[in-house]
Every structure is written in C-alpha cells, then in structure tokens.
Amino acid sequence: MRLTRLTCATWNIHRAKGADKRVDPDRIHRTIAADLAPLRLDVLALQEADGECRPHARILDMRRIQADTGLVYQHDQHAMRWGSQSDGFLGTILFLHPLFEVTHRDVVDLPGHCHRGAVVVETLRDGVDMRILSTHLSLFQPLRVIQMRIIGQYLRRRPKMQTILLGDLNEWRPWGGLMFHRRLVGQKLAGPARATFPSRRPLLPLDRIMTDRPDGVFDAQAMSTPNLRMASDHLPLIASVKVS
C-alpha cells in the first residue's frame, strides 16, 4: 500500500528542565513512553536534547527512546553529532520509522549569538522521496530570517523532493513573517500554527510542522497531558503530513 501520510511530532524538552525547574531526564523518558510512543509516530524531532554549552553533552538514553518508540536514531555517524559527547547536533535529535530508507544525511551550521543548526535526512519510503529537516532557530527575528535563508540555499543544492520542516522555530506570529517567504526560502513552506509555549498556559506557536505541499499538514495539535505540562516548558506539537 502506497504511503499517503506521516504522523510527526516535534518537542523542545528544554534540556529536561521541567516546569518545576528540576532537571529530570528520567521524567522525559517516562513521558515519551507514556504519551508519545502510543501515537505510533513516523517522525520524532527533539530540540534542546543535549547540553546547552560545550561539549553539548548527552542528556538522554537514545537506546531507551528507540526501544520505547520503535523509531530509529539518526545520529549514529559521528558527522551527525556536534561532538563525541553529544547525541545530536546542537541539541536537535531526529528519530524516524524503520521503514524509511535513508539516502542522505547532513547537518547545517546556522549563525547566531547562540550557535544553531539543522539536521537533514533524505529518505525513500514506499517509493516516495522525502526530506525531513529539523532545527531550532534563534529567538531574534532578524537572525531567524538569515537562518531560514541559509536553509533555503542548502535546499537549492539538493535534489527536488517533498520537504518536511519541523522544530522549535521560535516564530510567535501565526503568519510567520518574512522567514517563511517563498522568495527567501526558495519554496513555500506552510503548516497550521498551534500554541505550544509556555506549556502550563500555551499562548505562542513557537513549534511548527510544515511542508511544501499545499494543505500538506493537517490534524495539528499541541498535545497536553499532566506529564507533558510538567516535563518541559514547551508542549509537543503533533500533526499528520500528506505525502505526495
């Protein structure tokens, strides 16, 4: 049966610092197992999932997440991690369903006062080529524009295929402003805006799931449970993405 949709989730775990200000990686693991794993995700992107400062050291147990979700960790190669003590690239970690055939993986450095980056995985699944790109962008709007321009330049050099962008994009305006403009990025990326921050009383749609297919993202929701509201200051964003 040809693949027609993906179930995707993105969650900024704030380096496992919960709403009670306590750093508790085990709480993140329990919450992923209890609240996200039952969704049978195809894509899970985490942000702030390594230490904030050099050496951006690991916080979570990748094997445990794989076992709980059935997803495959995409940073097994050293080039996909910031350093030897990291699990991801500047806190961004990507997991994919085992049915994805990975054809290319990359990381993209992005400028800013705080070093940012994007993780890119190009895949083939059920005969459909698609690119999964996860990132965590700057709090400063002019820097986000520059960062998205660099991502757009990177995409221009890569083969044409459906692109799914997800992560903490730190854009609070539902319409997105210049940073998502086709002339800046080179393609039209769109998706519903759902308030994900702060987790106890969500007001701002900082986390996004977007794609370059018209009306390609649907059933988007900020998932809220007592566990999720306590585990991080962001709620995870869950959405279905039409694949074509």
Image (cartoon, helix red, strand yellow):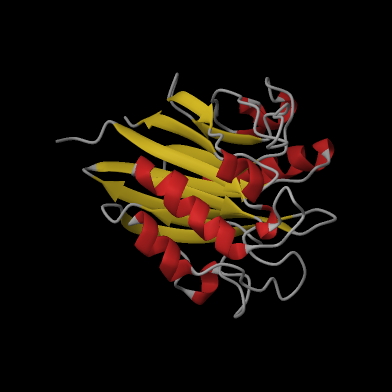
User: In the displayed structure, does residue 58 sit left or right of residue 140?
Assistant: left
Give the total number of marks visible in the rendering.
Answer: 0
Q: Considering depth in this image, is 145 or 11 the residue closer to the camera?
A: 11
Q: At which x and y percent is residue 18?
A: 69, 52
Does residue 201 lie above or below 117 as drawn?
Answer: above
Residue sitting at 44 percent across and 72 percent down? 76
Q: Quadrant of the N terminus?
A: top left
Whether residue 158 is visible: no
Whether residue 133 is visible: yes
The image quarter containing residue 69 is bottom left
Residue sitting at 38 percent across and 37 percent down? 7
Q: Quadrant of the C terminus?
A: top left
Q: At which x and y percent is residue 64?
A: 43, 67
Q: Residue furthest left?
A: 1
Q: At which x and y percent is residue 62?
A: 47, 68
Q: Residue furthest bottom?
A: 84
Q: At which x and y percent is residue 217?
A: 45, 26
Does residue 104 lie above or below 201 as drawn?
Answer: below
Residue sitting at 40 percent across and 51 percent down? 122
